Amino acid sequence: MASISRNLRRYFAPDRLRRLLLLSQHPREYVTAECHRPVVLHKRGPDILHDPWFNRGTAFSMTERDRLGIRGLLPPNVVSSQQQIDRFMLDLIRLQNYARDGPSDTYPLAKWRILNRLHDRNETMYYKVLINNIEEYAPIVYTPTVGLVCQNYSGLFRRPRGMYFSSEDRGEMMSMVYNWPADQVDMIVVTDGSRILGLGDLGVQGIGIAIGKLDLYVAAAGINPQRVLPVMIDVGTNNEKLLKDPLYLGLQEHRLGGDEYVSVIDEFMEAVFTRWPNVIVQFEDFQSKWAFRLLQRYRKTYRMFNDDVQGTAGVAIAGLLGAVRAQGRPMIDFPKQRIVVAGAGSAGIGVVNAASRTMARMLGNNDVAFESARSQFWIVDAHGLITEDRADIDPDARPFARRKGELGHQGLSEGASLVEVVKKVKPDVILGLSAVGGLFSKEVLEALKDSSSSRPAIFAMSNPTKNAECTPGEAFSILGEKAIFASGSPFHDVDLGDGKIGHSNQGNNMYLFPGIGLGTLLSGARLISDGMLQAAAERLASYMKEEEVLQGIIYPPISRIRDITKEVAAAVVREAVAEDLAEGYREMDARELARLSEEETIEYVKTNMWSPEYPTIIYKAD
Ligand SMILES: NC(=O)C1=CN([C@@H]2O[C@H](COP(=O)(O)OP(=O)(O)OC[C@H]3O[C@@H](n4cnc5c(N)ncnc54)[C@H](O)[C@@H]3O)[C@@H](O)[C@H]2O)C=CC1
Ligand SMILES: CC(=O)C(=O)O
Ligand SMILES: [Mg+2]
């Protein structure tokens, strides 16, 4: 040691050398002493999180988060700096292993990381890249890759994005909401992580889906990215793997339930609408039992909607109407379609509810019409066909349970299997929202060959890709070129030989939710009515031209998503005006909105869509 210090003395001043030697002999004491010296900062809030010198990310303690105005800007689990390093190293090693072993998921995840880094550095450039290459990158920032991102979010987490409200923040949310740096927020997408795509309960990691949906709000609807807010409400998780994972970033306790759960969501809604009275809140990927209840609880009071229940329903209706047109029949023939739905969750029941209402309207909107519309649907869930005979029937599914009187002559009974139902009903359409990959098996597709339709339609709508009820290759190989195919996540078209193509449509709520949000914003509608949602669905249905539909193309390609969103938003604005819900937006008051023609409404929407261009920046001293 003496010779080392003799040598070092040649290079370092005595005081510096004394500190270095102290460090080498007693690293812990020295570091502790150094760390305890306070640092005076002239910044608070997100500025600290973006400062590489002072940012501690998830290691900020709760008292520090309160003191520095960053509570809610980080996932709720406070971790030690060693845990942070463990998480980083695990993620790094995972990437190295993937790169070496080359499983198919590595490449999209690597693309997501690169895009995400750009998102953190330069929002304008990020959205320019996304918009200009939407076909290539929507499957990365949205389904299917966003599912993989959510599954790995605790490892992928780098910079905070969005807000986190947890059950431990009860009583604090009203003040926490002011920690968000933007004075204006137009669009919030909120999830509690309880059912992310078809991947189940992913707890706090579900924030990825809120971020992905808002990326589409910016790219497709032109909502200003400075005015969007992804939100995670962390009330725990029932995912046993996450509960045991030392690197998990969320609350490691079982989910709150009952009134306690509702009180957390109530507090969140009150807080965000107090700070931003005109915000629109999209509920996303809440497990079914809460999806319906929360929708009923808030939809008459707040500007909100549930994307899985209402957005999916509209997209399905548009596709179902497209399938009718593809048979060369007018849309008014829709009430004659026999539809088997696999899945009775938020999405499945949402579709059956809205589609049967659409049929009933076409039939005259009276009791007889509703009864006739109801009888066109057969719902199969994990326990088989849902009938009146089922014990403990879910109240949301009850109106669509097959009646005792109908069952005998159809040769079906409670709990009949999907294949049995398809064989007996000979439906025009099978629609999957079950989250069960491969559910439309060879046997089911073979049974559909006896469909009464000239163009049987298969909607394999579950996400992500591995949850699709079947692939287009399977559908076309069994049902031939006349089949109509749509899936929730993107698939390539299928080459059927002889120059023929089996079109693979993407039937995803991404074709509606951005337009519903934008139309609500620009109309200043107080609420989001059934009529506004119906107008959105009808505009999507009519967007496809006759010759496209006859070729089996029932949804637009994603490259047209900005255009279709503009049209959907304009339809929503006009319906809000017609229903006297519109209160106007900025200088466009309700009376002026009402005077706009259809073309002028579309132009109004277009001019209010944000585009990624660098603005001129001017410096002004405080
Ligand atoms: N394409 C799109 O735009 C959308 C797709 N989805 C997808 O729909 C799926 C379901 O979502 P939720 O309804 O919220 O989920 P959920 O978990 O509430 O419902 C799933 C339903 O499927 C049923 N099911 C399970 N196994 C089955 C089987 N073997 N046969 C028939 N039914 C079965 C369950 O009993 C339940 O009724 C997810 O994969 C989600 O990604 C959801 C919203 C939009
Ligand atoms: C697309 C969507 O919202 C879902 O799969 O949940
Ligand atoms: Mg969803």
Image (tube, helix red, strand yellow):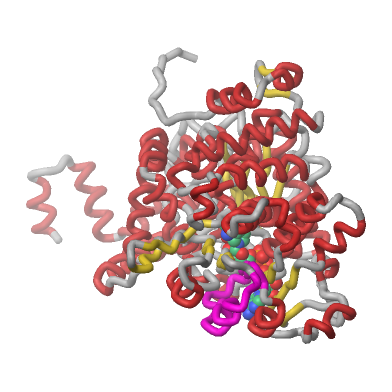
Q: In this view, does 591 lie to the left or right of 156?
A: right
Q: Quadrant of the N terminus?
A: bottom left
571 or 345: nearer the eye? Answer: 571
Task: Please tell me in which quadrant of the rendered image residue 121 appears.
Answer: top left
How far from the left and from the top, in percent, is residue 296? 82, 52
Asked whether residue 433 is drawn in magenta, I would say yes
Write the residue at 56% across / 24% down: 603
41 or 507: nearer the eye? Answer: 507
Q: In this view, does 621 lie to the left or right of 374?
A: left
Q: In which quarter of the image is ligand 2?
A: bottom right
How far from the left and from the top, in percent, is residue 40? 46, 33
Q: Can residue 67 be spotted in the picture?
A: no
Q: Is residue 110 left or right of residue 7?
A: right
Asked whether residue 71 is drawn in magenta, I would say no
Tell me which segment is drawn in magenta: 427-452
507 or 60: nearer the eye? Answer: 507
Write the residue at 50% across / 15% down: 622
Residue 561, compared with residue 91, is above or below; it is above
How far from the left and from the top, in percent, is residue 114? 33, 50
How far from the left and from the top, in percent, is residue 46? 50, 37
Residue 295, compared with residue 242, is above or below; it is above
Write the residue at 92% across / 57% down: 367
